[in-house]
């Protein structure tokens, strides 16, 4: 009987670890995704500004792209930041996979039907042994 509770406890502990690891990862990944969304908005705004300035330059017949270099650099920086954040997400997901492997979740999951049958058999056996001792 003690073995049954031990199995149940192990299964619950492993499930709890799995849920904790996944939820922690999800929170961190979502924080990063919010940052990525903010950077992409800034990039879109900068690109719209560049487009408006180019349009004005063209209407004045004086297109000078060198005056826009600072904004081009800004866009490149935004792209680099998004790449860096995506790398962080990949790293977090790799850490999650490692944690799940360490927890050895998949190998020790208990099948409810077989667990119930085993439990019933073990309880009957223990009851029989107890009655025999009396």
Image (tube, rainbow, N blue to C red):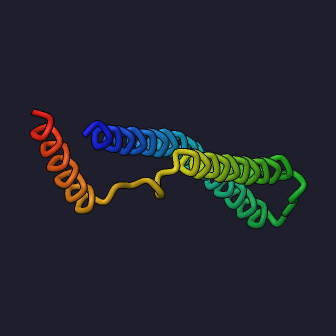
Does residue 36 appear anywhere in the picture?
A: no
- Where, quadrant-wise, is the N terminus in this rendering? top left
Residue displayed at 68% across by 57% down: 47
Q: Which of 128 and 115 lies nearest the eye of the viewer?
A: 128
Q: Position of residue 13 (x, y in %)?
A: 39, 38
Q: Looking at this view, name the residue that lies furthest to the top.
A: 134
The residue nearer to you, when weighing 82 against 28, is 28
Say how many tags the image has. Answer: 0
Q: Describe residue 83's horizontal placement relative to residue 73 as left or right.
A: left
Q: State the image quarter where residue 52 is shown.
A: bottom right
Image position, residue 23 (x, y; %)? 44, 42
Q: Is residue 39 left or right of residue 109?
A: right
Q: Quadrant of the C terminus?
A: top left
Residue appearing at x 90%, y 55% in the figure: 66
The answer to whether residue 4 is seen in the rendering is: yes
- Vertical placement of 21 versus 59: above or below? above
Q: Residue at x 42, y 43 (%)?
A: 14
Left or right position of 36 against 130: right
Instruction: Give whichever of 84, 134 is nearer the camera.
Output: 134
Identify the residue shown where x is 52% and y is 43%. Answer: 25
Query: Residue 76 at what x, y percent from top left?
Result: 79, 53
């Amino acid at each position: 009987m003690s073995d049954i509770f031990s199995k149940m406890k192990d299964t619950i502990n492993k499930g709890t670890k799995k849920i904790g690891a996944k939820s922690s990862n999800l929170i961190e990944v979502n924080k990063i995704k919010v940052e990525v969304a903010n950077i992409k908005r800034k990039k879109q705004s900068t690109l719209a500004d560049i487009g408006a300035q180019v349009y004005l330059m063209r209407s004045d017949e004086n297109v000078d792209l060198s005056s826009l270099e600072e904004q081009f650099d800004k866009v490149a920086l935004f792209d680099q930041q998004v790449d860096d954040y995506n790398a962080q997400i990949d790293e977090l997901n790799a850490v999650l996979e490692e944690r799940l492997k360490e927890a050895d979740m998949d190998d020790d999951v208990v099948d409810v039907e077989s667990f119930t049958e085993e439990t019933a058999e073990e309880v009957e056996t223990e009851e029989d042994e107890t009655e025999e001792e009396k």
